[in-house]
Image (cartoon, rainbow, N blue to C red):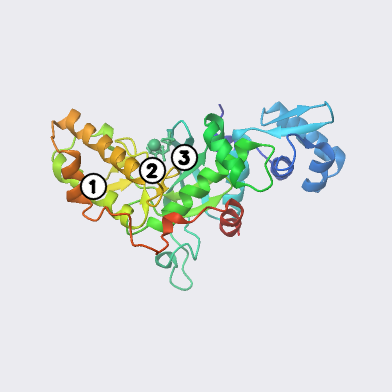
């Protein structure tokens, strides 16, 4: 696959407008019809046809002629749609190397700006430009692999999308965005910066995944992680996919917990079980790699003394359902 940044630079405005138009059209039908694309892209039929032919040539768009002339985008084209929005919004200035490819995401490093209003600290003094900051751009890929996510996306969306993968990926990004917004900065998670379609922009956390480092002092580091797990629990969340792959170790030995799309509310009936599984995953890692022997009970009680079901009656951040359209709408401006 061609580098995403190069693919982006090789697109002209017309092609970007066409990709956006096809994506829009796919919200209501499996194949966006030619008429629909022409109307949405505000191009002449001739200009649209030649642009679409180029996009088909670049394998960013596929075409059908039955039962009508229609077009579809795939994940890479969808990445380009989100990226063009983030560039237009001045969030992303340049895209760097691939940081990671997972089952359910592709993450790139980038340079950009924290949009004013993203949080108070980020507002620059008057007359000054915000500084460029290293970012991580995570393009969600949920719908590609997980039928469960797809079904969940369908249930959540009133309009029963034709193209489930787009909605599943959007929902994954929206869920992760919502969780990071609720947890940052009290819990050590990457600072959320922007959301567009299925792309989540966060601050680059630096550091190295826990599974790749050899810690000099594993025990205090395990305690640091358990404190963050407890802190997230107090704010109403269980990570639910915690492992040595989703913990970053900073250069100063600080901890950052990443990868939150599957987080559940602590009021979820499975919350306690998922919390225990998270903690057990960590303990297994430290036992295997460092021969550190801490029981699950001790870990749960030392780090999270108040593992009760939470204050009765009070609604917590983790309880809110995600409304993809409003979350995205607000963030996309
Ligand atoms: N904010 C960040 N700062 C620095 N690196 C990051 C950041 N977010 C993600 N990464 C890097 O990208 C990789 C993949 O990100 P993440 O764990 O969020 O998704 P994933 O592993 O693809 O998801 P899945 O577990 O579903 O496969 C991480 O292992 C990490 O190396
Ligand atoms: Mg991960």
Residue 184 position within the rendered picture, expressed as x and y whole percent measured from the top left: 37, 57
Return the residue at label 1: 226
Q: Quadrant of residue 250?
A: top left
Residue at mark 2 to residue at mark 1: CA–CA distance: 19 Å
Q: Nearer the viewer, residue 5 or 63?
A: 63
* Label 1: few (<14), some (14–19) or many (≥20) C-alpha neighbours in 10 Å: many
Does 33 sit left or right of 244 as displayed? right
Measured as percent of width and height from the top left, residue 238 is found at: 36, 47
Task: Name the residue rendered at 48%, 42% in the picture.
Answer: 138
Q: Is residue 153 left or right of residue 309?
A: right
Identity of the residue drawn at 32% across and 54% down: 309
Check the picture and name the quadrant holding the N terminus.
top right
In which quadrant of this rendering is ligand 1 seen?
Answer: top left
At 29% from the left edge and 49% from the top edge, which residue is drawn? 229
Relative horizontal placement of residue 74, taking residue 255 as reference (left or right): right
Label 3: which residue? 108
Is label 1 in a helix, a strand or a loop?
helix
Calculate the distance from the C-alpha at mark 2 to the C-alpha at mark 3: 32 Å
Between marks 1 and 3 in the image, the one whose residue lies nearer the viewer: 1
Front-lying residue, 173 or 156: 156
The mark that comes first in sequence, 1 or 3, is: 3
The mark that comes first in sequence, 2 or 3, is: 3
Q: Which residue is mark 2?
A: 270
The residue tagged with tag 2: helix, strand or loop? loop
Q: Please indicate, yes or no, whether residue 201 appears anywhere in the rendered image.
A: no
Residue 148: x percent and y percent? 52, 34
**Local crowd at mark 2 within 10 Å, few (<14), some, or many (≥20)?**
few
Of labels 2 and 1, the one closer to you: 2
């Amino acid at each position: 696959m061609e580098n995403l940044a190069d693919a982006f630079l090789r697109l002209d405005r017309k092609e970007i407008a066409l990709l956006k138009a096809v994506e829009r059209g796919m919200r209501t039908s499996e194949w966006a019809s030619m008429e629909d694309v022409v109307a949405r892209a505000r191009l002449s039929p001739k200009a649209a046809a030649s642009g679409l032919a180029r996009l088909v040539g670049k394998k960013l768009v596929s075409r059908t002629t039955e039962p009508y002339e229609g077009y579809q985008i795939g994940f890479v084209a969808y990445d380009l749609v989100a990226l063009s929005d983030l560039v237009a919004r001045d969030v992303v200035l340049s895209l760097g190397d691939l940081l990671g490819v997972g089952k359910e995401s592709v993450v790139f490093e980038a340079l950009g700006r924290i949009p004013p209003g993203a949080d108070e600290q980020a507002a620059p003094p008057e007359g000054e430009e915000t500084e460029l900051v290293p970012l991580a751009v995570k393009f969600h890929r949920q719908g590609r692999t997980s039928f469960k996510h797809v079904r969940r996306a369908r249930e959540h969306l009133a309009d029963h999308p034709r193209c489930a993968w787009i909605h599943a990926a959007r929902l994954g990004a929206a869920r992760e965005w919502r969780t990071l917004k609720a947890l940052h900065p009290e819990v050590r998670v990457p600072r959320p910066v922007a959301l567009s379609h299925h792309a989540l922009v966060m601050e680059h956390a630096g550091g190295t995944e826990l599974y790749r480092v050899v810690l000099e002092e594993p025990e205090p580091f395990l305690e640091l992680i358990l404190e963050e797990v407890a802190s997230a629990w107090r704010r109403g969340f269980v990570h639910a996919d915690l492992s040595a792959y989703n913990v970053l170790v900073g250069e100063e030995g600080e901890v950052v917990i990443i990868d939150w799309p599957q987080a559940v509310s602590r009021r979820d009936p499975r919350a306690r079980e998922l919390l225990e599984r998270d903690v057990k995953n960590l303990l297994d890692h430290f036992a295997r790699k460092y021969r550190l022997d801490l029981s699950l009970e001790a870990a749960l009680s030392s780090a999270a003394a108040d593992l009760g079901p939470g204050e009765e009656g009070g609604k917590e951040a983790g309880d809110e359902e995600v409304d993809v359209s409003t979350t995205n709408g607000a963030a996309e401006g």
